Image (cartoon, rainbow, N blue to C red):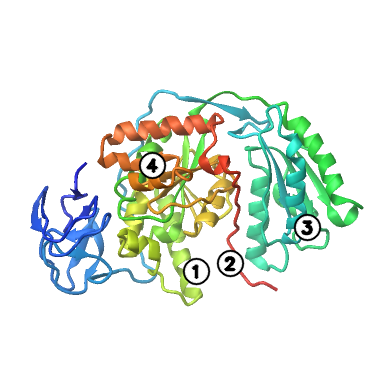
Amino acid sequence: MQDTIRINAKDTVAVALKPIPEGTHLTGPGFDVVTVTEIPQGHKFAIRPMKAGEEVIKYGFRIGYATKDILPGEWVHVHNVKTALGEVLSYTYHPTGKDLAPTEDAWFLGYRRKDGRTGVRNELWIIPTVGCVNSIVQAVEKRAGYLIRGTVEDVVAFTHPYGCSQMGDDQDNTRKILADLVNHPNAGGVLVMGLGCENSNIEELKKYIGEYDPNRVKFLVCQDVEDEQEEALKLLEELAEYAGSFVREKTPASELVIGMKCGGSDGLSGITANPVVGAFSDLLISKGGTTILTEVPEMFGAETLLMDRCADEALFEKTVDLINDFKEYFTSHNQTIYENPSPGNKKGGISTLEDKSLGCTQKSGSALVKGVLAYAEPVKTKGLNLLSAPGNDLVAATACAASGAQIVLFTTGRGTPFASPVPTLKISSNSRLAGNKANWIDFNAGRLVEEMSMEELSLDLFRLVLDVASGRKVKAEEAGFHDMAIFKQGVTL
């Protein structure tokens, strides 16, 4: 295993791939230094002198400015570098890139739905219209375990605290997310449970659901029946009979929609895990598939890389709006745009938002941007799509699922046990995490700096995704975890 990596020939820093003691002689492409301080794993060190105010370069791009003179071999982090980001910006379209060349077909075993879409799971979902019935749907979920048989793989209740006392766009987004889940192809049958007096009641929600198959989607208003749990179980039995008629069948990988998200990142995330996911994304898109990149605040500082890869100027303008609208969301709440890296990010070696964003956007690979989606908007275009959602792990992963992702790939350098409404495959940036948290981590991308090439590792990940799409459970599913979170943006009455 190599000790350090200089990611780009333009970089003024390199990254330690393992802890490096003070006084260590380090050489690499374009540098020969002796460390003047200890360098933690995943952290940066200077490979040449930098003056106060000078740009610090990583990934070939500026990640901030030096706040003081920095010596070669010195640790470069929050104590001597600061963000260079400002407020809302104007942008110019400089198109780069081209469509990926097609590659040979790949296949998985999926559930073909009557609307033509494909699910990778055949579950019964219970969707509450309002948080008031959360305890009821959880009780029904527990009692309905006997329905997990044949090709019915699970019964899952997705609780949330919303659906009432919301206003305007905030309430509208809740309804959209719930309707997206009702229509999701991973659900073989759906029971929508309402209270009866909420703003987002069942009749209101039906306007967002649109046309539906009454054999697949059923509704229950708890205030209208004597024993809501018994009535719910009767409806779930009918749904189980319907869902049980579906069997897995050979399906082209072009039917896959995969969400891409990172969280609990470290200094290796942008070197191992995120680039591996980017290579996976390119591979899936070359086979006609679709990927969704989200967490807009973690595009700040790297947004022009995505803008210039937009397939046309109309998409470029939508991406500009995507970025600037989110910046205005921050400023409208009197929050700074650039204060994003979490304590865990900083401990892992990420110093500024640009540092985080340039690593985050590695998940997009090299494909052209073919779609730009509003929050809760279903994906319509094959290829790489950008989705408006915040960086919060649960909210962003739920947004990917709501837009149509059947699986979410989640890269991490720190580790997390959370799940989402769809199988959430955890990818570690380093082997230590993969070994220490084997009950959380599904795939170790840390091998990229140890034993495997990018081509080998991305193909290995692609095969794993096909296996998961064909029924293999990810670690969070094995633990019985299913989470859902809606983006709360407005006033609560």
User: Which residue occupies 38% across, 55% down?
Assistant: 265
Marks 3 and 1, the one that precedes in the sequence: 3
The amino acid type, in three-letter code, at marker 2 is Gln
Q: Is residue 268 above or below residue 242?
A: below
The amino acid type, in three-letter code, at marker 4 is Val
Label 3 to label 4: alpha-carbon separation: 39 Å
**Comparing labels 2 and 4, the label whose residue is closer to the camera:** 4
Q: Which residue is mark 4?
A: 277
User: Label 4 neighbourhood size at 10 Å, few (<14), some (14-19), many (20+)?
Assistant: many
Q: Which residue is mark 2?
A: 489
x, y percent for residue 105: 44, 23
Q: Are marks 1 and 2 in contact (CB under 8 Å)?
A: yes
Lateral position of residue 33 relative to residue 208, left or right: left
User: Which residue occupies 17% across, 69% down?
Assistant: 54
Q: Which residue is mark 1?
A: 329
Label 2 to label 4: alpha-carbon separation: 30 Å
Q: Which residue is mark 3?
A: 201
Looking at the image, which residue sits at the far bottom? 334
Q: Are marks 3 and 1 in contact (CB under 8 Å)?
A: no
